[in-house]
Amino acid sequence: MSFQELYNKHCKQGHHYTYGTAGFRAHNSVLDTVMFTTGIVAVLRSIYLKSKFVGVMITASHNPPEDNGVKIVEPHGEMLVQNWEPIATKLANSASAGFTQLESALKAITDELHIDTTQLACITVARDSRESGPRLLAALRAGISVFSNVKIVDFELLTTPQLHFLTHTLNSSSSPSTVKESAYYDHFISMWNQLTQLHHVTELPFHLTIDCANGIGADKVKELIAQAGSVLASSLSTVNGKTDTFQLLNESCGADFVKTNQTFPANCSPEPSQLYCSFDGDADRVVFYYMDDKENKFHLLDGDKIATLLAKLLADLLHQCGLSDTLNLGVVQTAYANGSSTKYISDDLKIPVSCTKTGVKHLHHEAVSNYDIGVYFEANGHGTVIFSSKFVETIDIALQETSKTNKNKHESLLSLQLFSQLINQTVGDAISDMLAVVATLSILKLKPEDWDQCYHDLPNRLTKVIVPDRSVFVSTNAERQLVSPEGLQAKIDELVAKYPKSRSFVRASGTEDAVRVYAEADTTENAIELATKVGEQVKLHD
Ligand code: 16G
Ligand code: ZN
């Protein structure tokens, strides 16, 4: 089919597309056009990067089943570079205006970036379990097929982080055609086995129930458990794994549900002191929780608790190897991190903390730019740890120089090396993060309650205010202060001054047509009151 015929078959006119925090996301019925143009963008990006594999993931993460979305993965597994987001947006909105507009926008981009569209493009694609996935994949493939010199590896159903990992693996492999989905399981199981054998872990200190949000993570974590040894198989089980009942996706379950409602998901009968975790719909996010044995209360172990657990282990290992002054370790958070976690990391662990804007791409960038070991997590459970090339070289050299007679140092060095491979460094990964947390708790012999003791969250409240135009809410200082609308920040400051240990900020959502209000204070009542009063001010200023 010609370009125009493909366009006519898959594209509709009239929808305005915006590139959100993590790609395009909307009701599936309006997405065919942007899938088509994202296929084109992925081809252009691959050619621009000299035929490296570029990934395209079709997913809408924790959003409802009828939504869908698309995001582009860079060759090393990061999210699309930010200066290409306007290109993706321009092509989508040109296609939405008409075929001639799309053709001329495409020509303007290829001319400006000197992209020769006859060169080879290499693309990986995958989708989550949504019903609209196959139709949207067809639109994406049609966009890709506008170009004649393309190699596509279609992994079919994957979690988002699996596609990030496999895209990176393909680009690093000398024989890309041999890279299959199994490379993911082989890698993480091997690292898990080596790390836990080194520490003589023969059983976990708890049973872990995994809530899979009825999403694609269910099939994939079951595959991993089936292939892993008996330690995991005997201590891990899954709930909410109905991937093929589309309408159940993220319904009363999953990481977003648990974090927002601070309660157990559907189909989970909690037992005291056992550990639970929830993935989101595309398994790039995980939160843990448990029920205590005294009051049978729900306790959340969110991204902040994960960050502190991993940072403490890594800091201790660095110290044991005598490398604390050579390799710098830091934690990256967003303004949503609980104030107690930030205080605990800087005052008790004495680890530097940076704060960035919301969205994985911002945290990832900060972690790469500043630290040899960068632990980054959003409170909602998105995150990972990344290790610099200096880290890799330093550990390699130290391992060669340390004889096995210095058993403790050798073991700590090896632990650091294995840990850096057990975590999916390309992007936050619910499965890999879960393995890293479980390995850490098993090595340190910690029960859920012990992990929870490191600090106590300040009471907090997150609310949403619907406004006619969220774009007037412009923030600065990693979203902690507003520069517009005029006068609103001064009002927030006045309110904050009235409550002990309080903090509040307002930001426009990057994924929904709403403004979010966060408040924390010394008591739950005060946090709720502060959030309510700040919300009232937001309404007065919209
Ligand atoms: C997206 C982001 C997530 C962020 C959330 C904020 C990625 C992969 N996902 O889901 O990191 O926390 O948006 O949503 O970057 P908001 O802007 O609506 O508050
Ligand atoms: Zn997600």
Image (cartoon, rainbow, N blue to C red):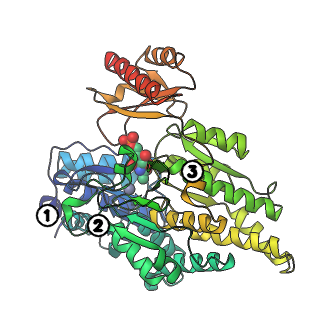
Question: What's the residue at 58%, 39% (across, down)?
Answer: 355
Q: Disc 3 versus disc 2: distance between alpha carbons? A: 48 Å
How far across and down, in percent of the image, does residue 235 sit? 48, 74
How far across and down, in percent of the image, does residue 519 sit? 46, 29
Foreground disc of the pair 3, 1: 3
Quarter that holds the C terminus: top left
**Residue furthest front as drawn:** 294
Judging depth in this view, the residue of 217 and 86 nearest the camera is 217
Task: Tell me the residue that label 1 is attached to.
Answer: 5
Q: Amino acid at mark 2?
A: Ile
Q: Is residue 147 visible?
A: yes
Task: Tell me the residue that label 2 is attached to.
Answer: 144
Q: Are marks 2 and 1 in contact (CB under 8 Å)?
A: no
Task: Tell me the residue that label 3 is attached to.
Answer: 452
Q: Disc 2 versus disc 1: distance between alpha carbons? A: 14 Å
The 10 Å Cα crowd at callout 2, few under 14, some 14 to 19, many 20 or more, is many
